[in-house]
Image (tube, grey):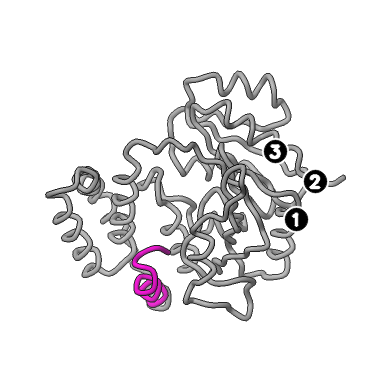
Amino acid sequence: MNRSSVGVVVATRNRSARLAVTLRHLLALPERPEVVVADNDSTDDTRARLAREFPQVRVLALPSNRGAPARTHGVRALDTPYVAFSDDDSWWAPGALARAAGLFDAHPRLGLLAARTLVGPGQEPDALNKVLADSPLGPATDLPGTQVLGFLACASVARRSAYLDAGGFHPLLFFGAEETLLAYDLAARGWGVTHCPDVVAHHHPDPAPRTGRPAVVRRNALLTAWLRRPLSQALARTRDLTAEARRDPHARRALRETLARLPGALRARRPLPPHVERAARLLDADTGDIP
């Protein structure tokens, strides 16, 4: 059987047991995708375990923790026209990658699709599914599904050329709520970003909350505003976070980390073109900043 036209990139760090579960699911897919693991300088037994148990998987042993941009190293290592992303706690349903490839083949402007995500052993729908399905941006005649400006990274498939054209995940954000900025950059380059619920991903996140994640999400939302949104909006969001920081330790950390990264954000600032900014504002009004 020929290999799939969709490769899979898995970014990981120090979660070898969970990664092994993910790889067993991916390697059992009927599409037989090529799988690349971008290892963010793990200090556990990840690399030894990969060599021992999964010799057929290509491993990129990164010399430092690159965060979400580790995925870009994986995309560059593949030569498939389409690339699906998994985290070390997520995988794709049988047939999902073939369905995604068909959608990309049929819609040349499609840059990235957001799948329907089922969570945990009970396969409960992720709350984001409804947010994406109800996007006020609606359909486009030359795209499948519903237009969106956000997605869950571990449940997304991208056209490789579009991903590289948009620059991939931005290094300034590192990890956490990094998806909206990439969606903005794809749309700014003319690529479609849509939610296609007939493509299904499975996500089995660790039930223990990640330390510091609320602060990171707030930080990256504000940095995204400074990178791409009008100055008036970036300033207003900064004022709001500053007010929250007086009583909320997560907000204080988010503000402190934003200010440390602000010079880099200003150097990389590239406001959205008017039609994408209008779409972003429509989503802001509809969902209260949930893309």
Q: State the image coordinates of residue 286 (x, y, percent, origin top left).
A: 39, 73
To which quarter of the image does residue 195 belong?
A: bottom right
Residue ID for mark 2: 30
Report the residue at 49% width, 25% height from top.
42
Q: Is residue 286 magenta?
A: yes
Q: Residues within 10 Å of mark 2 (few under 14, many from 20)?
A: some
Q: Residues within 10 Å of mark 3 (few under 14, many from 20)?
A: some
The amino acid on which the numbered mark 2 sits, given as a three-letter code, is Pro
Tell which residue pokes out farthest to the front in this image. Answer: 122
* Disc 1 and disc 2 in contact, CB within 8 angstroms: yes
Image location of residue 2, percent across then percent down: 84, 46
Label 3 to label 2, Cα distance in Å?
10 Å
Q: Which residue is mark 1?
A: 98
Amino acid under label 1? Ala
Kind of residue at disc 3: His
User: Which badge, 1 or 3, is on the more N-terminal residue?
Assistant: 3
Residue 289 among those drawn in magenta? yes
Residue at left offset 60%, top offset 18%: 48
Please state if 181 lies on the left or on the right of 129 as rendered. Answer: left
Q: Residues within 10 Å of mark 1 (few under 14, many from 20)?
A: some
Badge 1 element = helix
User: Over which residues does the magenta segment extend?
Assistant: 278-291
User: Is 75 situated above or below 60?
Assistant: below
Which of the numbered marks, if any, corresponds to residue 13? Answer: none
Distance from Cα at disc 1 to Cα at disc 2 = 9 Å
- Between label 1 and label 3, give the one nearer the viewer: 3
Tell me: residue 124, above or below residue 52: below
Residue topped by disc 3:
25
